[in-house]
Image (cartoon, rainbow, N blue to C red):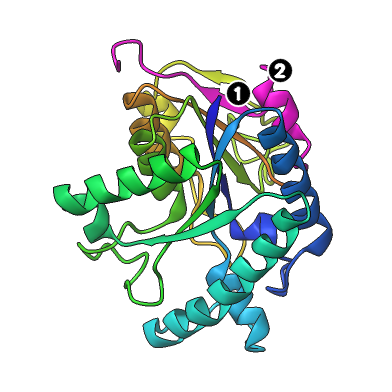
Amino acid sequence: MRVVIKVGTSTLTHPTGNLNIRRVERLCEVMSDLKNAGHELVLVSSGAIGMGVGKLGLDQRPDDMPTKQAAAAVGQCELMYEYDKLFSQYHHVVAQVLLTGGDIRDPHRCANVRNTLSRLLELRALPIINENDAVATDEIGIETTIGENDTLSAIVAGLVEADLLILLSDIDGLYTADPHKDPEARLIPVVEEITPAIEALADGKGSKLASGGMATKLKAARICTGAGCDMVIANGARPDQLYDILDGVPTGTRFLARRDAK
């Protein structure tokens, strides 16, 4: 299978912003094993700002744009260093691809992105993608940005014609209510269509270092399923779940591709 995996800041880091070493090591080990089994993988990785916050010794995710961009510049170096080191242990080559909204919206630049990603996969490299937050004004709706990595991962899934998009987050999937507040909340295993009732279940966002939430994941699901690709939301605290997901074992919440999409 060709699979895009998105990991959020809450999966990669501790609440302090420092790297969650044990979890990231296991994630890279599982992904390396999946590549050894013949799957083509693309990783869309958040975490640059969060890791920059930790490395710069800041107390929390900054509110002002220049400090966000500075944290992203510092954190992206650290993030790619860790990925290169960990995947190299299993003899896999990684490639950094930083994108902006303009790269997606401009047809010529978008074609270049598609060609680069396709060639990297042909060469058996592992593309690691993030928005170029050091120069893009992120998460505030500016026309030149993508905004957050849930949406970016869905766009990438369409560009590479992926079979599956997996969003690894700090929650097990989509629930009938907020599981942190309602003990009666139930996990929804399959979503066949994103209806207004499904959209009404999205509220708020996760950790203080993250930029996404369930609303952005439903937006990603619309893009992804509309491109003919299934999408799964699963808990990134357990990277071994990737084996189950690719084996077709019910895990998290699966959004089914629209039948008329392809």
* Front tag of 2 and 1: 2
Tell me how many marks there are.
2
The residue at which mark 2 appears reads as 249
Screen quadrant of the N terminus: top right
**177 versus 191 height, above or below:** below
The residue at which mark 1 appears reads as 188
Residue that lies at the very extreme toward the front in this rendered image: 123
| Residue at disc 2, secondary structure | loop
Q: In terms of image quadrants, where is residue 78?
A: bottom right
Near-viewer residue (252 or 73): 73
Q: Residue at x 74, y 59 (%)?
A: 86
The three-letter amino acid code for the residue at tag 1 is: Ile
**Main structural element of the magenta stretch: helix, strand or loop?**
loop
Q: Residue at x 46, y 80 (%)?
A: 68
Instruction: Mark yes or no: residue 202 visible.
Output: no
Residues at marks 2 and 1 touching, judged by CB atoms closer than 8 Å: no
Near-viewer residue (127 or 216): 127
Q: Residue at x 39, y 68 (%)?
A: 132
Question: Does residue 87 show up magenta in the picture?
Answer: no
Gap between marks 2 and 1 measured at Cα: 15 Å
Q: Residue 43 bears which disc, if any?
A: none
**260 versus 71 height, above or below:** above
| Residue at disc 1, secondary structure | loop
Question: Does residue 261 show up magenta in the picture?
Answer: yes
Q: In terms of image quadrants, where is residue 142?
A: bottom left
The three-letter amino acid code for the residue at tag 2 is: Val
User: Magenta span covers which residues?
Assistant: 237-262
Q: Residue at x 59, y 79 (%)?
A: 52
Instruction: Mark yes or no: residue 194 visible.
Output: yes
Screen quadrant of the C terminus: top left
